Image (cartoon, rainbow, N blue to C red):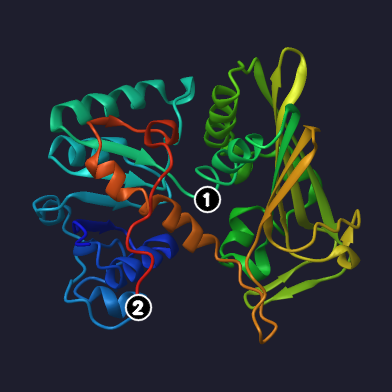
């Protein structure tokens, strides 16, 4: 069967963007026609050189106007934070947008920007979709998928466990506040804490899927300190400072905690922490208490050589990329997971 080919632009080449370029180059369903970069060291380089694969013939540029002028079906937009006006420009100009940067499900936190995106979709006869791993899959699609096999839901808990020293860029050490004095850490805003409105979108999607209404979302955070210096390639997390953190966000429905998200980021095992937290390996874990109580874990596969891979950035990219054909083929508008239904990935089975 001959597949339609979708012309795509990769907007930025961080960890998620690099995974996307590698996939677009290998999957015959996609034709990579442009790559936008921010780092001046990447400008003028072949996208393959940037991402560690064979040359693609696509030369990276930082010229936004040149990228916008390209003929493409979709822009895969992967900056850490979204420029809503720029996304609307793309949509009004006739390019569908699939992104990992936000807007996974409508909530009041993003009502104004959501209205801009919907209007741009109508003006450009285009579609928009936000996806990823969490939010965008592990904290919303998977819990609702698991709920299909139970008779009653009393509580849904989603655990994101990440060992930062082995499964995340080391710049996350500073971003996340590791190495701070515990009292200072707990009294100041945190990167994960500032992300609550984004994770609340996943909670809202679960609630909508279960036909209930969230009354409020509450937050709590705990920290563990290092009982010894924890070395890493950029230095060390000093003894007596924060070396692990556990954020807990709870969506209350009719006076009870129905949906609870746990974001657990650590840099050491229980032997080097106080309290001696032992959260295990990097993974996503969904636990439904109900009838029957049911659990699902998503984690990287142990390799024959003993290595353990956590393909978090690949998951983030592919969860959204695999929706691109369905988004391009859909009617104009902001498409949620509910609008797309069961995504049918294309081009995954290949030589």
Residue 303 versus residue 28 in the image, above or below: below
Closer to us: 107 or 185: 107
The spot of residue 240 in percent (x, y) is 85, 60
What kind of element bears circle 2? loop
List the single residue furthest toward the top: 254
The spot of residue 192 in percent (x, y) is 62, 44
CA gap between label 1 and label 2 equals 26 Å
The spot of residue 12 in percent (x, y) is 32, 59
Q: Quadrant of the C terminus?
A: bottom left
- Residue labelled with disc 1: 133
Nearest to the eye among marks 1 and 2: give it. Answer: 2
Residue 5 versus residue 91 in the image, above or below: below
- Residue labelled with disc 2: 351
Q: Quadrant of residue 348?
A: bottom left
Residue 348 versus residue 284 in the image, above or below: below
Q: Which mark is residue 203?
A: none
Q: Estimate how packed mark 2 is, as few (under 14), some (14 to 19) or many (20 or more) residues with alpha carbons within 10 Å.
A: few
> Could you tell me which residue is drawn at 73 percent across and 54 percent down?
180
> Could you tell me which residue is drawn at 16 percent across and 76 percent down?
57
Circles 1 and 2: CB atoms closer than 8 Å: no
Q: Is residue 162 left or right of residue 120?
A: right
> Could you tell me which residue is drawn at 61 percent across and 59 percent down?
174
Q: Is residue 122 left or right of residue 234?
A: left
């Amino acid at each position: 069967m001959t597949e339609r080919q979708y012309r795509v632009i990769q907007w930025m080449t961080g960890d998620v963007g690099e995974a996307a370029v590698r996939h677009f180059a290998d999957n015959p369903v996609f034709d990579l026609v442009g790559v936008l970069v921010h780092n001046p060291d990447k400008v003028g380089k072949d996208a393959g050189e940037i991402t560690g694969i064979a040359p693609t013939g696509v030369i990276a540029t930082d010229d936004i106007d040149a990228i916008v002028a390209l003929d493409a079906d979709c822009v895969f937009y992967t900056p850490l934070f979204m420029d809503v006006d720029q996304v609307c420009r793309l949509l009004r100009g006739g390019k569908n947008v699939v992104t990992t940067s936000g807007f996974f499900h409508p909530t009041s936190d993003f009502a104004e920007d959501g209205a801009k995106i919907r209007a741009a979709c109508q003006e450009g006869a285009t579609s928009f979709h936000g996806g990823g791993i969490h939010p965008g899959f592990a904290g919303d699609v998977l819990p609702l998928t698991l709920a299909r096999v139970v008779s009653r839901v009393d509580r849904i808990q989603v655990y994101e466990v990440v060992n930062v020293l082995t499964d995340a860029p080391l710049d996350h050490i500073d971003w996340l506040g590791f190495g701070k004095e515990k009292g200072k850490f707990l009294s100041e805003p945190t990167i994960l804490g500032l992300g609550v409105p984004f994770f609340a979108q996943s909670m809202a999607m679960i609630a909508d899927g279960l036909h209930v209404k969230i009354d409020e979302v509450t937050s709590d955070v705990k920290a563990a300190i290092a009982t010894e210096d924890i070395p890493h390639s950029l230095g060390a997390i000093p003894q007596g400072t924060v070396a692990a953190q556990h954020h807990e966000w709870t969506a209350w429905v009719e006076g009870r905690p129905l949906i609870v998200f746990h974001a657990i980021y650590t840099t050491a095992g229980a032997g080097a922490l106080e309290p001696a937290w032992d959260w295990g390996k990097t993974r996503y874990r969904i636990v439904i208490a109900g009838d029957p109580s049911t659990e699902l874990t998503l984690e990287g596969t142990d390799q024959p050589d003993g290595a353990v891979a956590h393909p978090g950035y690949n998951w983030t990219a592919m969860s959204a990329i695999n929706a691109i054909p369905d988004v391009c083929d859909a009617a104009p508008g902001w498409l949620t997971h509910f609008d797309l239904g069961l995504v049918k990935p294309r081009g995954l089975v290949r030589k």
